[in-house]
Image (spheres, rainbow, N blue to C red):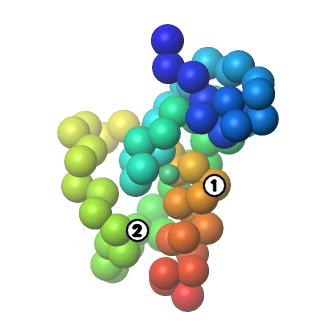
Amino acid sequence: MLKCFMCDEKNKTEEAVSICIVCGMGLCMEHARRADLEIWEGHYPMPVKTMENDLPRFLCEYCIEATYIATD
Ligand SMILES: [Zn+2]
Ligand SMILES: [Zn+2]
C-alpha cells in the first residue's frame, strides 16, 4: 500500500488516498491539497503533463507553496 509521505516524515503511518501530481509523493486525506483550477489557468509553472485522466488533481503542501510563489 502507498503511504502518506508527509505522515511518514512525522513517524506516522497513514494510507495515501492520492498522490501529488507534481512530485508524486503519496498523500493522505489530511495532507492532500486539491489543486483548484485557477492555480493552473494560463501557464503551467511546472511540468504536470503526466496526468492520464481527468482525475482530481492533488498537490502536496510543498508543491502548493512552490506554485503560489511561482505565480505570485
Ligand atoms: Zn498524511
Ligand atoms: Zn508535491
The location of residue 69, given as percent across then percent down, is 57, 80
Under circle 2, the secondary element is helix
The location of residue 62, given as percent across then percent down, is 60, 58
Q: Residue at x 71, y 19 (%)?
A: 13
Under circle 1, the secondary element is helix
6 or 21: which is nearer to us? 6
Q: With respect to residue 25, does 46 lie above or below? A: below
Disc 2 vs disc 1: Cβ atoms closer than 8 Å? Answer: no
Q: Which mark is residue 40?
A: 2
Mark 2 is surrounded, within 10 Å at the Cα level, by few (under 14), some (14 to 19) or many (20 or more) other residues, namely: some
Alpha carbons under labels 2 and 1: distance apart: 16 Å
The location of residue 34, given as percent across then percent down, is 56, 49
* Total number of numbered discs in the rendering: 2
Q: Residue at x 57, y 49 (%)?
A: 60
Q: Residue at x 49, y 81 (%)?
A: 70
Q: Residue at x 53, y 60 (%)?
A: 63
Residue 39 located left or right of residue 33: left
Check mark 1 vs ligand 2: CB closer than 8 Å? yes or no: yes
The location of residue 58, given as percent across then percent down, is 50, 46
Residue assigned mark 1: 61
41 or 23: which is nearer to us? 23
Mark 1 is surrounded, within 10 Å at the Cα level, by few (under 14), some (14 to 19) or many (20 or more) other residues, namely: some
Image quarter in which the C terminus is found = bottom right
Residue 49 located left or right of residue 68: left
Q: Amino acid at mark 2?
A: Trp
Residue 37 located left or right of residue 72: left
In the figure, residue 51 lies in which quadrant?
top left
Q: With respect to residue 40, does 31 lie above or below? A: above
Residue 46 visible: yes
In the figure, residue 30 lies in which quadrant?
top right
